[in-house]
Amino acid sequence: MATTPTQHHSLKALPFNVATDFTVLAAHCEQYAEALLESDNPRQRRNISDALATALNRLQSGLHNPVPPHLINSLTVDALPASAPRFEPDSEQLAEYCLTLTQILINREVTDQSEKSLTGLLYDLVSYFAADLQAPRYLRTAQGPEELA
């Protein structure tokens, strides 16, 4: 979950367009998800949700594009990372997420508590997604960058 308060007014300073690198866009998504998690203002939540949806749609539409050459160096490491991004909610969070999603499917409605749980799930998923997109993809070799399997 979020550990650092986000200043919501600074989210307006997160511009992006079709040329925005996926690593930057992933970081923006994570900031939007964190701001959403911390906001209690319905209007602000709607604006943040809209910005997050737009950024996630841009990310999704480019998932199968090759990594741009100017990003390869920033995604290249000299040694294999000790760990990779992981999504590991604790058992209480996992149970809450599952129950909330089940209730939404059954009732087709969202209570305040369910919205809070879904926002937490959304934050965890977006954080995992952003970490996965920003993780090293290449290993530096004498022959040049080699894609990690």
Image (cartoon, helix red, strand yellow):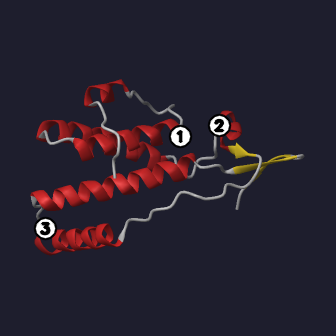
> Mark 2 sits on what residue?
71
Q: Residues within 10 Å of mark 3 (few under 14, many from 20)?
A: few
Question: Regarding mark 1 in the picture, which secondary structure is present there?
Answer: helix
Contact check, label 2 and label 1, Cβ < 8 Å: yes
Which badge, 3 or 2, comes first in the chain's sequence?
Answer: 2
> Mark 3 sits on what residue?
108
Residues at marks 2 and 1, CA–CA distance in whole angstroms? 9 Å
> Mark 1 sits on what residue?
23
Q: Is residue 41 left or right of residue 89?
A: left
- Split into 4 quadrants, where in the image is the C terminus? bottom right
Which badge, 2 or 1, comes first in the chain's sequence?
Answer: 1
Residue 63 in sight here: no
Q: Residue at x 56, y 46 (%)?
A: 134
Question: Regarding mark 2 in the picture, which secondary structure is present there?
Answer: helix
Residues at marks 1 and 3, CA–CA distance in whole angstroms? 34 Å
Point out the frontmost of discs 1 and 3: 1
